[in-house]
């Protein structure tokens, strides 16, 4: 059977083309407004191919983001270091990732997708898997009781997510106006307070 003009068959190149088209659409108009049909038209494929490769718009969105930037590896590198300044390192790494113009538009699109009620599992799942679980594991490695580690991690993540949203998603004027270093210096004490005084004493 002949395919319609401009329609591509399935394959690795087609999958990459769909991801490129999806990323561009999500960044341009956001998760909510972008449709599978729009993305299929941009990629020059049948909409059924998107379902075949990715299953759902949520899964497509996650795949497109992972291909573009991976904050998970940034976070992992910070968690592997000493816990004494873990909070500041995480804040610094996240701020520099968001400040990178190659990442910001995509990250803001993801934040809006999770905050607008369309796909909260997307951002919630990232926070739980990439931040909460590794932080809890790292704190317990240092000898902190699991329940205490979970509480400290919850406070730390609330602080981190809150300041990131204020600066990049809500774009609160007084917060967004700060330079990268000014922002880190201003909010590092509040973020670090989540762990200060709770880490087990070292011999």
Image: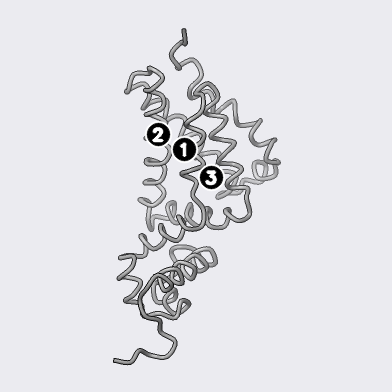
Residue contact between numbered discs 3 and 1, judged by CB atoms under 8 Å: no
- Is 158 or 140 nearer to us in this picture? 140
Element assignment for label 1: helix
Residue at the spot 41% in from the left edge and 74% down from the top edge: 14
The residue that disc 3 covers is 165
Mark 2 or mark 1: which comes first in sequence? 1
Q: Nearer the viewer, mark 3 or mark 2?
A: 2
Q: Measure how far apart labels 2 and 1 are at the Cα level.
A: 8 Å
Residue at the spot 37% in from the left edge and 29% down from the top edge: 137
The residue that disc 1 covers is 76
The residue that disc 2 covers is 134
Q: Which mark is residue 84?
A: none
| Vertical arrangement, residue 197 with respect to residue 9, above or below | above
Residue contact between numbered discs 3 and 2, judged by CB atoms under 8 Å: no
Task: Please give the count of numbered marks on the rendered protein.
Answer: 3
Residue 92 position, x and y percent, is 59, 36
The answer to whether 10 appears left or right of 186 in the picture is left
Element assignment for label 2: helix
Residue contact between numbered discs 2 and 1, judged by CB atoms under 8 Å: yes
User: In the current view of this chain or complex, which residue is farthest to the top?
Assistant: 203
Residue 81 position, x and y percent, is 51, 28
């Amino acid at each position: 059977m002949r395919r319609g003009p401009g329609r591509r068959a399935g394959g690795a190149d087609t999958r990459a083309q769909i991801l490129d088209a999806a990323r561009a659409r999500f960044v341009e108009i956001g998760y909510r407004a972008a449709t599978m049909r729009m993305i299929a038209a941009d990629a020059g494929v049948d909409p059924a191919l998107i379902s075949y490769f990715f299953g759902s718009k949520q899964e497509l969105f996650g795949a497109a983001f992972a291909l573009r930037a991976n904050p998970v590896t940034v976070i992992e590198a910070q968690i592997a270091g000493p816990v004494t300044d873990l909070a500041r390192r995480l804040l610094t790494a996240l701020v520099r990732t968001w400040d990178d113009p190659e990442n910001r538009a995509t990250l803001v699109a993801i934040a809006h997708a999770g905050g607008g009620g369309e796909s909260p599992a997307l951002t919630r799942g990232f926070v739980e898997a990439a931040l909460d679980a590794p932080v809890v594991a790292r704190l317990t490695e240092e000898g902190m009781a699991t329940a205490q580690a979970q509480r400290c991690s919850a406070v730390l993540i609330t602080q981190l997510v809150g300041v990131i949203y204020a600066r990049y998603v809500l774009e609160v004027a007084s917060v967004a106006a700060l330079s990268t270093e000014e922002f880190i210096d201003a909010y590092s004490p509040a973020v670090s307070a989540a762990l200060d005084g709770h880490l087990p004493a070292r011999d």
